[in-house]
Amino acid sequence: MMFDAKYEAMSRDELAQLQIERLQATLRRVCRNVAFYRTLFNERGIDVEEVRDLDALQQLPFTTRADLQASYPYGMFAVPLRDIVRLHATSGTTGRPLVVGYTRNDLDHWSGLVARQLAGVGVDEHDFVQIAFSYSLFTGGLGFHYGAERLGASVIPASNAANSADQIAIMRDYKTTVLAGAPSSALVMATALEELGLHPEELQLRVGLFGAEPWSDDLRERIEERLHIKAFDTYGVSEIMGPGVAAECEQRSGLHINEDHFIAEVIDPITLAPRQPGEEGELVFTTITKEGFPVIRYRTGDLASLVEGACPCGRTNLRMSRVKGRTDDLVIAQGVKFFPSQLREVIMQQQWISPHIAVIIDRKEGSDTIEVRAAVSEQAPFFDEVSKVSELHDNAVRALRMSLGLSVQLTFVEIATLRREVGSKGMRLSDRREL
Amino acid sequence: MLRVRNLEAGYNKLKVLRGISVHVGAQEIVTVIGANGAGKSTFLNTVAGVQAPRAGDIEFDGQPIGGMSSFEVVAQGCALVPEGRLVFSPLTVEENLTLGAYTQYKQKRNAAVERQMERVYHLFPVLAERKKQLAGTLSGGEQQMLAIGRALMANPRLIMLDEPSMGLAPLVVKSILETIASLRDDGVTILLVEQNSKAALGIADRGYVMETGSIVLEGTAQELLNNNDVQRAYLGKDYQTIDER
């Protein structure tokens, strides 16, 4: 079912008119109200009045994660703060957090877009939607919450359920039909279900919408088999909106991009040249309705391709493939985004630990495990004292948890072994998860 | 129905419209709001062919109409109710209405014109009561009704109104706007330009906010009412800093 058929099934011609109108208005607003864009366009000699068609968007500069970090906290807001009614932020593990502000209209659009993606996979007002995303500065929980509420479904804000057994109890007793959460959490719940000796058919669950971390078709199959549901992919980026940027319909032939709110491009992450539909590259989004936090050509760092052509579901908007990976080595594990080099930085701050590390990420029963293999420096005066080494170990583990929020298993190995393992770069990452 | 892209217009060296893109769907009520001097009237006049565009495209039902003269635009089915009403004061109400039908008028009054006039009288009964009265003796509200009636005589599919609330008492404004909204039920599409943004958004489906010759916001009427910038645009105010209170 289409929640908003006027826009979801708009003719390409009408959509192009709507997009150029909204793009032009957005460009004028950012020029007027966001010093970053005003300066950027002035420096490059760009007159936004010259943007007369959608192709002209390609003449505009990109916005990067670094630009947003430099604007911390409110530098990219396009309205006075009194017009902002909600703040969300990224975790900030990879640097300063990115703070995103929403006006009342932004929240209204956002709810509508999430309602679209729920309706698109057959969810309606009769459903009970259990939201296992965290309700926090992270956009997942509240994003899905407002969308499901807009649709008229019964919302179960279950992110605080202490463990997966509690989630299962809620799911069984409250007759949950739809689960929204991270795909890894679905696997954890499947395991809990088995441990409780319950059969999936004892639940009413039929649909799952998953996102916020990469997951493969293989993982999708496993989730579907173990929970007896149909699992759908959703794509969201907090800097763009949160959930609701793009999502699969029941056809599962790519994720429909909400083009009446976001203009999508795919570029070569090295040359920055545009990529043709079907060619993989970095996803770039321009928001065309956002009031609080508009972004022009924001580089997401996510790799995917665009899919042209009509979908049998009747929606006319452009689709994107499922996200294939990242342009950088950003890792999402235990629900935290981080660069492996950040682990090394923390280790290097520890006295008497050699700066070489090997990082092994794996997934056991749906939970991500992070093993860091390091070596005690040969210069350490207490090289042979077990209690001192053990203290060193505990301090390092605590530092990793404090600075990155990661639960890391630290193993000390012989430095010679480690050197062979990591080679000249000083570190090595192996991600053994079957995503 | 109406699709405008990158429209530019001005007077001599003055650039008034700086690339306007706007669309109006069939049987939609769309409003363009903004402060005095934003370029709203220039926009309507340019679409109506009163003034020539400098650049950009205007399409009406898929036909390019940019640069057509005003009578050609009317013949396409697109009529303008100008700002300040501009009724012909020394003529009677009926004569004013007949003049509005000039695109169809052939020597004698034909049946189609009669039917149009009946429709206008049905819409504005007060005009029927005063059909023999000179237009100049009507009240402001009645003159506005006459101006709208005169535009309807051309049997337009799109009617464009420039500040119909101007100089009218609030109650009269309400009644005029309600009548305008009711035209949609007759299959007429409406493009309304107003400084009285609250009244205009009260009847519109969608709207655009114009500031110094540019569109800075597009959205449903409700969204624009929610937007504090709309209030600022209406008042012609701008904020200086992000944390201004």
Image: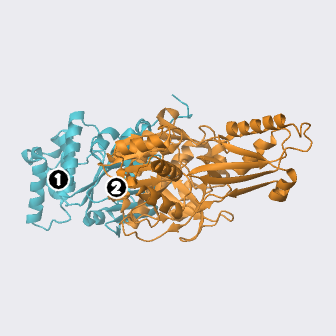
Chain colours: A orange, B cyan
Q: Residues within 10 Å of mark 1 (few under 14, many from 20)?
A: many
Placement of the N terminus of chain A among the 4 image quadrants: bottom left
Q: Is residue A160 left or right of residue A430?
A: left
Q: Residue at x 70, y 54 (%)?
A: A360
* SS type, badge 2: loop
Q: Give the quadrant of residue A266.
A: bottom right
- The disc labelled 2 sits on which kind of residue? Asp
Mark 2 residue crowding within 10 angstroms, few (<14) / some (14–19) / many (20+): some
Can residue A351 be seen here? The reply is yes
**Closest to the observer: A219 or A294?**
A219
Label annotation for residue B96:
1
Name the residue carrying label 2: A4
The local secondary structure at tag 1 comes to helix
Q: Nearer the viewer, mark 1 or mark 2?
A: 2
Q: Residue furthest front?
A: A197
User: At which x and y percent is residue A372?
Assistant: 73, 48
Whether label 1 touches label 2, CB < 8 Å: no
